[in-house]
Amino acid sequence: MSQLAELRTLIARHARNSGLGSLMPGLSMSADASRTEPLARIYEPIFGIVAQGAKRTMVADRMFDYRPGHYLVVSVDLPVTCQVTQASARAPFLGVGLTLKPDLIASVMLESESARPSLHPQPILVSEASGDLLEPVVRLVRLLDHPRDIPFLRPMIEREIVWRLLGDEQGGTIRRLGVADSTLSRIGRATRWIREHYAEPFRVQDLARHVAMSPTSLHRHFRAATAMSPLQYLKRIRLHEARTRMMTKGEDVANVGFSVGYESPSQFSREYARAFGAPPSRDAAKLRSALEPNPRGI
């Protein structure tokens, strides 16, 4: 059985396992039997591989399509719009993701004396996975069939995956995740700060001070790492949170707008419609009727 074929079999068997998060924290899977509507999400730093079907992820004005055998790396917390573009009941979309851990990356880099980080990290990159990378991914997912082996074997396999990523064409961006004082790490702290304080009044100067950068430098590097300015990123986070609240809780539009940091209901509705293609109430009703819960995954 080929590596991708075995990976498809493993994902199909385990994707609906409600105990996956406790068995293998940081490992996620997706299994969709049909195309999906564009869905706003926030990707944390993650590495993921598509085993079957196809998916599209949009960041600001950039579009990334990935198919079987392609892997994706997200380098910072990133608000995106994602959509399964190829899936059917007979051949569902299948994907697996693994959270990227800066401390693990740093450890592998120290032991291997890995090369310098990339000077121009990208928010999302898509590449074709080599057999050397697919092989440890298959072994990692295979551990779900042998839970007793997970505590002992997972750390070694995960280190191997990081080692393969460091040696691949996206290695430069992966390395920056492992360098605590790198520009990408500072931008990562900035995105996390925005996610934790999105409903509060926002000043770029305060954010720059928090990550020890000048406002000009922060703006330049933030856009390079996320394809957005800090203010555009904040708006995306606010709108994403608002959409989630209205879809899952059915809250009043005006109250939701105020709760995520908007002072004007009209401005909230206008920016929401511009981002998602319909006014808040109509969009939330459409999503509630059309979408089933989707497991977290790449």
Image (cartoon, rainbow, N blue to C red):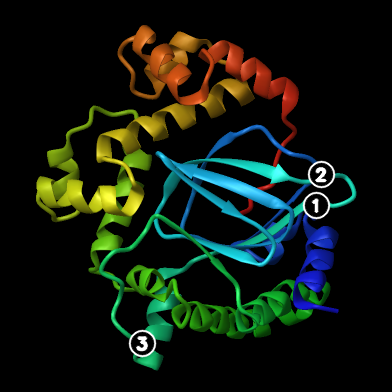
Task: Write down the residue under mark 3.
Answer: 114
Q: Position of residue 279 (x, y in %)?
A: 51, 12
Residue position marked by numbered label 1 in the rendering: 16
Identified at 73% across, 71% down, the residue is 141
Which one is in front in this view, the residue at disc 1 or the one at disc 3? 3
Q: Nearer the viewer, residue 198 or 291?
A: 291
Image quarter where the N terminus lies is bottom right
**Residue drawn at 56 percent across, 20 percent down:** 246
Q: Taking 68 as reference, is 85 above or below it?
A: above
Q: Amino acid at mark 1?
A: Arg
Residue 43 in the image, given as x and y percentages of width and height: 50, 49
Please name which of the two marks, 2 or 1, marks the residue nearer to the observer.
Answer: 2
Residue 4 percent coordinates (x, y):
75, 71
Where disc 2 sits, the SS reads loop
The reply to whether residue 250 is in sight is no
Q: Disc 3 or 2, which lies upstream in sequence?
A: 2
| Residue contact at pointers 1 and 3, CB within 8 angstroms | no
Q: As displayed, is residue 290 above or below residue 149? A: above
Which residue type does callout 2 highlight? Ala
Q: CA distance from mark 2 to mark 1?
A: 12 Å
For the residues labelled 3 and 2, the Cα–Cα distance comes to: 41 Å
Position of the C terminus by quadrant: bottom right
Residue 153, compared with residue 267, is above or below; it is below
Give the number of the disc on residue 33: 2
Lower sequence index among marks 1 and 3: 1
Q: Are marks 3 and 2 in contact (CB under 8 Å)?
A: no
Q: CA distance from mark 1 to mark 3?
A: 37 Å
Which residue is rendered at x = 61% and y = 19% of the image?
284
